[in-house]
Image: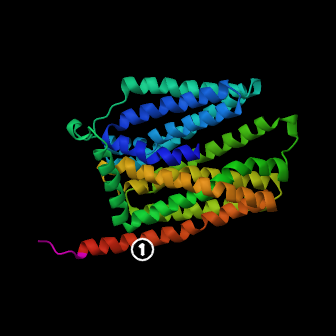
Amino acid sequence: MEASAFLFEIPTGVVADVYSRRLSIIIGWFLIGAGFVLEGLVPRFEVILLAQVLWGLGYTFTSGATEAWIADEVGEARAGRAFLRGAQLGQIGALIGIVLSVAAGSVRVNVPIVLGGVLYIVMGGVLMGCMPETGFKPTPREERSNWQSMVHTFRSGLRLVRGKPVLISILSIGLIYGLYSEGWDRLWTAHLLNDITLPTIGNLPPVMWFGLISAVSMLLSIGTTEFARRRVNTNDHLIAAHALFGLNALMIAGIATFALTGHFVLAVAAYWLTSSVRRTTFPIYTAWVNQHLDSSVRATVISMSSQIDALGQIIGGPIVGAIGTALGIPAALIASALILSPVLVLLVRTAVQNQTQVLVVETVPLE
């Protein structure tokens, strides 16, 4: 999946900038849904791999295009708050989905996967009928008869990134997010099962315990995202950087505590802290990237950010997994926390770079 995302992020981001954000998003929803349905219905390893490719390809059509579409429709000034509200509504939907998935999964494990895929496909059809696109200006039809316009859009996005040191630092942060996240995402459940063990209260099966833990995590995420929506001005670079510094410091502390404790209650509390803060971090980071982009290459540059994240996951996952195999899962989780820690240095760096850029602009004489 991550390999597919890495390969297709930039081409699909360019498609969204040249042709249509709306079309790109709709294609993505259909492909993700098809991937889920295929994976749930055919329990063969090679088919599941193909389904992961479809999922990764579909994700790239939505990644970048969704954020760019929102910014174009509501305006850059309101986009940050829209990202936070969207994340919050997504968390509410996920909370409902956890309850339904646990119930469906207790009957048969593949049922929630297939139902999720069907819902994606249905939503793609709904978007075809009601999704507007009023703020986007596609490349004129006479200028997109060949690959030249797509190459030009990609080069424009690359030139924008190279010309803004702040963007380079922000994309470097995205790489670190990818490097650390794969270890955390794949190993936290194994750590609870193997190193801490779940309580025997009520003889609840693991699927019920993880459903309960995830449900509480979602409730906390809704609260932290609402707090950020009210308190963080996502249109101000320094305020967003300060908020991200605090959130990432909490994530590092949460992962380290989760890795080192052997007590179930403390481990779950550390997981809740890390997961709720992480879900709040993503929309603020997206809004932060969006501050520095031109509309004509917005989807392309955001796709670059997602591609860098996918590259980080491809590299970081096996490294952290090897550490876990050699030294144990707690050591792998500690490694994930250490990998994330340079983000704090980069956040301080971006604040300095942005201040320097502002001073340079202010000292340019008016003609």
Q: Is residue 283 above or below residue 361?
A: above
At x 55%, y 25%, the residue is 119
At x 61%, y 50%, the residue is 276
Q: Is residue 178 left or right of residue 232?
A: right
Q: Quick one: quadrant of the C terminus?
A: bottom left
Residue 253's quadrant in the figure?
bottom right
Q: Position of residue 280 (x, y in %)?
A: 54, 51
- Residues 142 and 110: in front is 142
Residue at the disc numbered 1? 352
The number of numbered discs placed on residues in the rendered structure image is 1
Question: Is 58 in the magenta?
Answer: no
For the rendered model, the colour scheme is rainbow
Q: Amino acid at mark 1?
A: Val
Q: Position of residue 25 (x, y in %)?
A: 42, 35
Q: Quick one: quadrant of the N terminus?
A: top right
At x 25%, y 41%, the residue is 139
Q: Which residues are magenta?
A: 363-367
Q: Is residue 20 above or below residue 303?
A: above
Residue 238's quadrant in the figure?
bottom left
Q: Is residue 281 visible?
A: no
Q: Main secondary structure of the magenta part?
A: loop
Residue 21's quadrant in the figure?
top left
Question: Farthest residue in the left direction?
Answer: 367
Q: Position of residue 352 (x, y in %)?
A: 42, 74
Q: Position of residue 41 (x, y in %)?
A: 66, 24
Q: Helix or strand or loop: what does disc 1 sit on?
A: helix
Q: Is residue 130 left or right of residue 139?
A: right
- Residues 150 and 282: in front is 150
Q: Is residue 56 above or below residue 277?
A: above
Label 1: few (<14), some (14–19) or many (≥20) C-alpha neighbours in 10 Å: some
Question: Is 365 in the magenta?
Answer: yes
Q: Is residue 290 visible?
A: yes
